Amino acid sequence: MTNITNVDTKTVLQRSSGTATPTKSGSPAAAVPTENGATQGDQLSLTDRALQINRLLQLVEKQPVIDSQRVEKTSKAVSNGSFFVDPTSIAGKFANFENALRVISR
């Protein structure tokens, strides 16, 4: 099995000359005729994990990059001296993040 990294699935699908519909690995995809005479049996199969990652990417893309309300609230708290840093909470969040990275990289 070939390990492919740093592949943008949207770019790959958009650059394709035909229409591709992602399907689970092993399930047949409908043959789509293409303008450049590519094989009519061309298909794209994605593993369950790839489909899950694709769904997660779509959810993440819908989220705002900056939470304006949270920035405003934090700025006010810093300005008036009421901003509190809880080192235990931050350490726990770092640990959870590291564990999540380990799970993803498997």
Image (spheres, grey):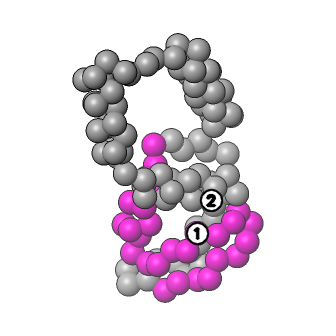
Q: Which residues are magenta?
A: 6-33
Q: Is residue 12 magenta?
A: yes
Percent coordinates x, y for residue 87 in the rendering: 52, 13
Q: Amino acid at mark 2?
A: Leu
Task: Write down the residue under mark 1.
Answer: 22
Q: Nearer the viewer, residue 13 or 64?
A: 64
- Of tags 1 and 2, the one toward the viewer is 2
Q: Amino acid at mark 1?
A: Pro
Task: Write down the residue under mark 2.
Answer: 51
The reply to whether residue 37 is visible in this rendering is: no
- The residue shown at (30%, 45%) is 68
Q: Nearer the viewer, residue 25 or 58?
A: 58
Left or right side of 81 for 37: right
- The residue shown at (64%, 70%) is 23
Percent coordinates x, y for residue 84 in the rendering: 43, 19
What secondary structure characterizes most of the magenta part?
loop
Q: Is residue 103 magenta?
A: no
Specify few, some or many for label 2: CA neighbours under 10 Å numbering under 14, 14-19, or 20 or more.
some
Q: Classify the position of the C terminus by image quarter.
A: top right
Identify whether 91 is placed above or below 32. Answer: above
Work out which residue is located at the far right of the displayed protein and give it. 26
Q: Classify the position of the N terminus by image quarter.
A: top right
Q: Earlier in the sequence, mark 1 or mark 2?
A: 1
- The residue shown at (36%, 66%) is 15
- The residue shown at (38%, 68%) is 14
Left or right side of 96 for 8: left
CB within 8 Å, label 1 to label 2: yes
